Amino acid sequence: MSRTTKLRGNPLALEGPELKVGDTAPDATLRKDLVSDVHLADLNGKARIYSVVPSVDTPVCALQTKRFNEEAAKMPGVEFVTISCDLPMAMGRFCGAEGIDKERLKVYSDHKYTDFGKKFGTLITDLRVLSRAVFVVGKDDTLKYVEYVPEVAEHPNYDAVLACAKAL
């Protein structure tokens, strides 16, 4: 059965599996900047939130990223990571313009490999962007919260995400 998300009510096909609470969080290779790869496995053993957005240059994605940046300041025991298919330069520009602390909220690009999107089931192949989703991963590297937002233009359930992360 094929999986889809919607953008303004129009269905878009998703590539990859639909992960569930209790699954082991996959490793994925992303770009930290133009020349440096980063592996999600480097965060193994830490509580973390993966905030997945189509593009930081859109209103809902910008608000989601700024919200998690604010929340990261209140939760020092949790790693916050924003992931999109934006180029690393675009993500860096956004963070600079919005005052995002990239030590507190890491921003990684899936543009080069789309490895994250394929392994976490968030890649909208036709648009080569990621669908909106949030994953909370425990210190045991299992998924504690999974939310694939059904309409790309809508926000995730911040309260549920943060409550889960605070309980880790």
Image: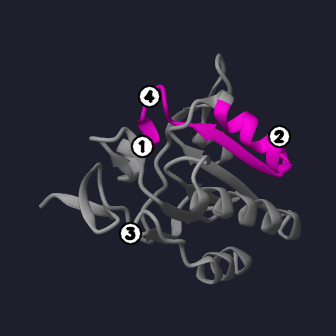
Based on the picture, tell me whether residue 67 belongs to the magenta stretch: no
Kind of residue sitting beneath label 3? Glu
Q: Earlier in the sequence, mark 4 or mark 3?
A: 4
Q: Quadrant of the N terminus?
A: bottom left
Nearer mark to the viewer, of 1 and 4: 1
What amino acid is labelled 4 in the image? Tyr
Identify the residue shown where x is 54% and y is 54%. 52
The magenta span reads 90-116
Mark positioned earlier in the residue sequence (1 or 4): 4
Q: Which residue is mark 2?
A: 96
Residue type beneath disc 1:
Val
Per the rendering, the mark at residue 113 is: 4
Distance of label 1 from label 4 (alpha carbons): 12 Å
Res. 139 visible in picture: no
Comes first in the chain, label 3 or label 1: 1
Relative placement, left or right, of 147 versus 105 is left
**Residue 78 position (above or below residue 29):** below
Q: Residues within 10 Å of mark 4 (few under 14, many from 20)?
A: some
Q: Would you call the spot at circle 1 few (<14 residues within 10 Å), some (14-19), or many (20 or more)?
A: many
Q: Which mark is residue 151?
A: 3
* Residue matched to label 1: 129
Q: Quadrant of residue 73?
A: bottom right
**C-alpha separation, residue under disc 4 versus residue under disc 3:** 24 Å
Going from the N terminus, do you reach mark 2 or mark 1 first? 2
Q: Nearer the viewer, residue 106 or 40?
A: 106
Relative vertical location of residue 164 with respect to residue 44 in this rendering, above or below? below
Let me know if residue 118 appears in the view.
yes
Disc 2/disc 1 C-alpha distance (Å) = 22 Å
Which element carries disc 2, helix, strand or loop?
Answer: helix
First in residue order: circle 4 vs circle 2: 2
Q: SS of the residue at dot 3?
A: loop
